[in-house]
Image (cartoon, grey):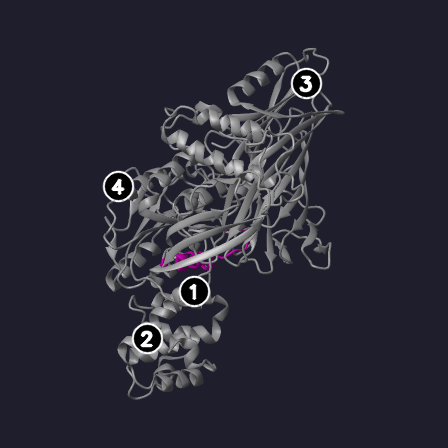
Amino acid sequence: MVNCCGLVTVKNEPVPLKSIAVEVSVQGHVATVSSTLQYENQEQSPLEAIFVFPLPGEAAVCRFSAKIGQTEVVAEVQEKQKAQEQYDDALSSGQQAFLLEESDESPDVFKLSVGSLPPGEKASVSLDYVTELAVQADDGLRLCLPAVLNPRYQPQGSDSGSGGSAQVSSVPAGSVPYSLSLSAHVSSPHPISRVESNCPLDPLNYLNTEKTQATVSLAAGHQFDRDVELLLYYQDTHQPTAIVEAAQASAKPGSLMGDPVVMLSLYPEFPKDVMSSMTSHGEFLFVVDRSGSMECPMHLGSGSQDRIGSARDTLLLLLKSLPMGCYFNIIGFGSSYESFFSKSVEYSQKTMDEALQKVKEMRADLGGTEILQPLKHIYSQPCLPDQPRQLFLFTDGEVGNTKEVLDLVKTNAGSHRCFSFGIGEGASTALISGVAKQARGYAQFITGQDRMQPKVMQSLRFALQPAVVDISVKWNVPKGVSVTPLSPPIRVVFQGQRALLYAQLTGESSGDTEGSVIVKYSLAKQPVENQLSFSLKPAEDTGMTVHRLGARTLIQSLEVEEREQDGEKEGVKEKVIELSVQSGVSSAFTAFIAVHKGDGEALHGQLLRRQVPTPMLYHSPMPKMMLCDMAQCSPMPMMMGCSLQMKMRSPVKLKLSKKSKDFDSPAPTSKPVRDPLLQLISLQKASGSWVLEAGLAEVLAKTEEEVSKPKPAQVDQEVWATVLALVWLYGFKMEAQEEWQFLAMKAVSWIQDQKATSVSECVQAGNNLLGCQVQKDTLGL
C-alpha cells in the first residue's frame, strides 16, 4: 500500500531539498556530470534525511562533497563496512556525516544519507560522475538525467530486509518541492551539428568557428518532473577516435592512475552488399512485460496510448516482419509468466494467425515485475540447430534484483543475443543496458513522445543481419611500452554500433610517439580489418574522465567475477577495493564517507528521519496492481496523521498457475482510431503477400470495385493486391519506412517467386489508381 502522507514535515512545510544544479562536460562520447543539491532543515529538531540518487548504469561516481554552513568536507572512498561504522559513530557523537553507497539490488541506485542537520542549518551536497553516452539509432548520443525512480518491485519470498535496501517515496508530479537547472559544455573532435532535448533548451552557443565546442542550457524555470534527456549530434560521428589521457601526477607509476590510459571509439565498417543480405534463420523470442505498470500511458498528455497497447502494435509489426523459415514464441511475464506456445514454433500462416489472436487478447494483468523466472525458463529450453536464439525483452524496468538478472544473462550469453527495450520514464538503465551488453545485443529507450515501433525495427534489423564473429584486437606500441586492456573482449559488433575500449599504457618509449590498434573479425564469412592510429602523447588535463571510466569498466568485470565465484576466489574483492580507493570510483564494496567534526558536541533534541521524494508521474505503477486513481490523489497539502481517501480500482486477480485461466482481463482504457498503416500490416500474409479484399480497399480509401477494375487482365489477383500495397506504402508512408521495410522486402520476394509477368503494367495501374508516382525500381522490382 502506498502512503502519500509521510512526505511532509510535522508543520506541513516542504521537505528539506530545495534545488538541484547540474553541470555537464561532454568530451566526444563520454561526459562528466556534476550535481549540486541544496538542503535546508526548517524544523526545530535535528534532521536525518535520505535521498536516493538514480544514476545511469554505466556511470562512475568520482567525487562527493558536503558543505554545511561555511565548512566544506570532501569525501573519501573507503571499504563499505568501515565507512558505515564511521558514519554511525559520527552521528552518535553529534557530528554531521554524509554517506554515499551503491544499492545492493541495483547499481543505478545510490542511497545518499545526509546525516544530522541542526535546526535552521543549510547544507549543500555535490556529486560528480563520469559516464559513456549511449549511441541512438539515428546516430545521436544520449545523456539522460533520471528523475523518476519507479518503486523497485521486490520478488515475493526474497529477503527484502537485508543489505539496507533503499526505500523510495513518491509524490504526484508538479508537487515536487525542488527545481532543476542544467548547463552543458560540449567538446568533440568532430563538429557539433545540433543538440536536442525533451525539455525546452536555450539556443546552442558555439564557442569556436570550427563548431567543435559549444554550450547549451535548459530554459529557466524547469521543474524536475520527467527524465531530462540531451541528444548530441556530431558530423562524421562514425569515424573512429582515440583519446590518450595523461597519468595523475600524484599517483605511483605502474598503477592504473599513475599510467596514461587510452580510450578508443571504434565503428567497424559494414560493406553495403552485406547490409542488404538478411538471414532467414533464427529463433525469435519476444519477452513482454505484462505487469500492472504496463497499463500506464506512453507519455504525458491526452490521447496517449498505454504501454501494453503500444506493445501489442509492436508485436503485430514484428510478427509480420519475420522471415519464412525461422522459429518464434512470445512470453508474457509479471508475478508469473506464460508462453503463447509450449515451445518455439516454425513461422507459418497458421502459427502467425494463432499468435496474432493471442496478441489481441494480451493485457497488463500479471501483477508485479519478476523477470528472473521467465529468463530461467527460456535458458532451460534447448537451442534449435542452425537457428540462433534472439531475445527481444520489453519492460518498464522496475525490478529489485537487477544484479541477479544480469549474472544469469551473462552465464547464458554464449547461446543467444538479447535486444532490450526500456519503456516509459524511469526505466532502469542498469537493467536495460546491462542485459543487452551481457548478451551481445542492443539497448533502446522509449521515452517522452517516442514511438516504440521504429526503435524495435532498428533492433530487428540488427538481429537479421549476419553476426560479426571471430573478433580479435591487436595493439601495436613502441618498444618499452606495454598495453594492459581494461575492457573485456568485444564479442559482437553491429552496423552503426560503437565499441569503447580502454587500455592502460605502462612504460615509456625513447623515440616513437605513435601507436595503433587493429581490429579483425569475420562478417558473412568474409574477413574484415580496421586499423586506427593514435598518439602516445597524452592529452592535456581532461579531469581524469578516461581513467575513471577505465577503472569502472575493470571494477565491473571484477565484481561479476567475484559474484560468480561466490566470494571464494581470493583477492578479487580486495583488488576491487584497492582500485576503487585509488581511482576514487565507487564500487559494490566501497562507499564515500565525509564527516564534519564541528565543535564535537552532541546535538540536542530528538533525531528525526525524512524521506526526500522523487517525482511520481501520474502513471507510475504501484506494487502488486494497487493502482491509485490520481484524480482522487491530486496535489494538496497533507497534515501528519491525516486520513487519505484513495479510490482504488478493483485489484486484478493474479494468475497463480500457468495452467489456470482464472484471471480478470481488464478492458483497454481507450479505443484509439485505427492507424491505416497498422491496418494494412495486419492484412499481410506470412508469405509477404496481400489478398484483394474489403479491408485492403478500406485502407486504400477505395471501394472493392474501384480496386478490382484497373487490374491488368493477365495478372493474378494476389500479385495485383501486393503491388497496390507496396505502391501505397511508398507513396504515402515513406516517413515510417523503418517500420515497414522488412514486410516490403518479403512482399517483393514473394512477387519475384511468382515469376509474374506485366509487373511494370501493375505498378503503373497502381499509381494511376492511388494518384502516386512510384517507380518500379523504387519498389525493388
Residue 45 is situated, as x and y percent measured from the top left of the image, at 68, 18
Residue 326 is situated, as x and y percent measured from the top left of the image, at 28, 59
Q: Earlier in the sequence, mark 1 or mark 2?
A: 1
Reply yes or no: does residue 456 show up in magenta.
yes
- Give amino acid for label 3: Ser
Disc 3/disc 4 C-alpha distance (Å): 56 Å
Q: Earlier in the sequence, mark 3 or mark 4?
A: 3
Most distant residue in the front direction = 510
Query: Circle 4 is placed at which residue position?
Result: 380
Disc 4/disc 1 C-alpha distance (Å): 37 Å
Disc 3/disc 1 C-alpha distance (Å): 68 Å
Query: Circle 2 is placed at which residue position?
Result: 693
Relative to 167, 637 lies left or right: right
Q: Tag 2, which secondary structure?
A: loop
Disc 1/disc 2 C-alpha distance (Å): 41 Å
> Could you say which disc has been placed on residue 271 in the image?
1
Q: Tag 1, which secondary structure?
A: loop
> Could you say which disc has been placed on residue 45 in the image?
3
> Could you say which disc has been placed on residue 58 in the image?
none
Is the residue 210 above or below the residue 363 in the image? Answer: below
Q: Which residues are magenta?
A: 446-466
Q: Residue at x 28, y 88 (%)?
A: 714
